[in-house]
Image (cartoon, grey):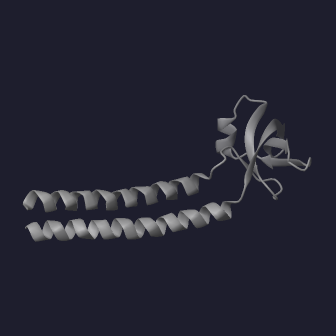
């Protein structure tokens, strides 16, 4: 029975660290491909295609984007909003500086690495309590 528990803890530690490192690498690649997002103050207005947000970029150019349904709900009743636009792209904006997808993958990686650390701690405790 003890050897089965030891094997299970060992498997969880290796899988936690290996898969956690792999997922962390994927999160890093996603972060790099996400690009640089700059803060701006956007003006909201209604149009034929739905609500628009318009803003000035760092070069002084005027940009605009149609709000998604979730963005419309989040900005309901506002005339101005703090937004983030992607540097070097026209018409790309979001309400958070960091990507929610990158954040989710990074949390998954942290959780898996946490499983690996917890498994090593449990392994150490089992080692000292038996000896």
Residue at left 64%, top 43%? 70
Relative placement, left or right, of 117 versus 100 is left
Q: Quadrant of the C terminus?
A: bottom left
- Relative image position of residue 72 (x, y in whole percent): 69, 39
Q: How many marks?
A: 0
Relative placement, left or right, of 55 versus 39 is right
Relative placement, left or right, of 58 versus 73 is right
Residue at left 63%, top 50%? 98
Q: Quadrant of the N terminus?
A: bottom left
Relative placement, left or right, of 88 versus 6 is right
- Relative image position of residue 117 (x, y in whole percent): 32, 59
In the depicted structure, whether residue 39 falls above or below residue 131 = above
- Relative image position of residue 86 (x, y in whole percent): 76, 54
Q: Which residue reaches farthest top?
A: 77
Quarter of the image where one finds residue 36:
bottom right
Residue at left 78%, top 43%? 50
In the depicted structure, whether residue 110 falls above or below residue 33 = above
Residue at left 37%, top 66%? 17
- Relative image position of residue 28 (x, y in whole percent): 57, 64
Quarter of the image where one finds residue 44:
top right
Residue closer to the observer: 28 or 69: 28
């Amino acid at each position: 029975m003890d050897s089965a528990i030891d094997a299970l803890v060992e498997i969880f530690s290796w899988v936690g660290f290996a898969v956690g490192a792999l997922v962390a690498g994927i999160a890093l690649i996603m972060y790099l491909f996400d690009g640089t997002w700059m803060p701006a103050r956007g003006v909201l207005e209604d149009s034929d295609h739905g609500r628009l947000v318009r803003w000035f970029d760092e070069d002084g150019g005027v940009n605009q984007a149609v709000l998604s349904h979730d963005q419309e709900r989040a900005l309901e009743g506002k005339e101005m909003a703090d937004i983030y636009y992607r540097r070097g792209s026209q018409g790309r904006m979001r309400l958070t500086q960091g990507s929610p997808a990158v954040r989710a993958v990074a949390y998954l990686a942290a959780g898996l690495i946490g499983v690996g650390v917890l498994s090593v701690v449990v392994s150490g405790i089992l080692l000292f309590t038996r000896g």
